[in-house]
Amino acid sequence: MASSKAKPLSLEDCRCLLCMEFLIEPITLPCNHTVCKSCFKALLRKTNLSCPFCRSLISSWARHHIHINSLINKELWGRLQTQYPEECRHRLSGEELSTFVFNDDPPIRRKE
């Protein structure tokens, strides 16, 4: 019987593949690629709105979801906040997380 609990996210799963930072307010595009909200806002400034990974057009989808205020993947965002509260807090406060090592282990700071 399948478990109803989702598999824990690794830190690598929590990285925005555009900015390479910890995902904050993740937005999952219709093609299932996920970016952080700040990277999505940067995509909106482009005239040809498409997924930066597979180039699927997302302009109609984006207009619809902006209009109904449902861009953020709330399920994923909740999991990120539950599993990695410190990383979320740091990113939301504007602190850089680039000193964290992204791997499957708990986050550790690199020696500077």
Image (tube, grey):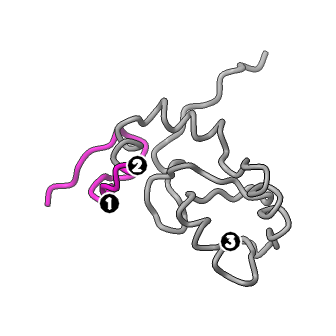
Q: Separation of disc 2 and disc 3 at Cα? A: 25 Å
Q: Residue at x 51, y 52 (%)?
A: 23
Q: Residue at x 74, y 76 (%)?
A: 49
- Which mark sits nearer the N-terminus, 2 or 1? 2
Q: Give the x, y percent position of residue 54.
A: 74, 72
Q: Give the x, y percent position of residue 93.
A: 34, 49
Determine the secondary structure under disc 1. Answer: loop
Identify the mark at residue 98; answer none if there is no mark.
Answer: 1
In the picture shown, does residue 34 fall above or below 19?
above
Predominant secondary structure in magenta?
Answer: loop
Q: Give the x, y percent position of residue 76.
A: 62, 40
Q: Is residue 93 magenta?
A: yes
Locate residue 54 relative to residue 78 in the image: left or right.
right
Q: Give the x, y percent position of residue 90.
A: 33, 47
Within 10 Å of the Cα at label 3, are there few (<14), some (14-19), or many (20+) other Cα atoms?
few
Locate residue 26 relative to residue 21 in the image: left or right.
right
Query: Which residue is most to the top?
Result: 1
For disc 2, the marked residue is 92
Q: Which residues are magenta?
A: 91-112
- Which one is in front in this view, the residue at disc 2 or the one at disc 3? 2
Determine the secondary structure under disc 3. Answer: loop
- Which mark sits nearer the N-terminus, 1 or 3? 3
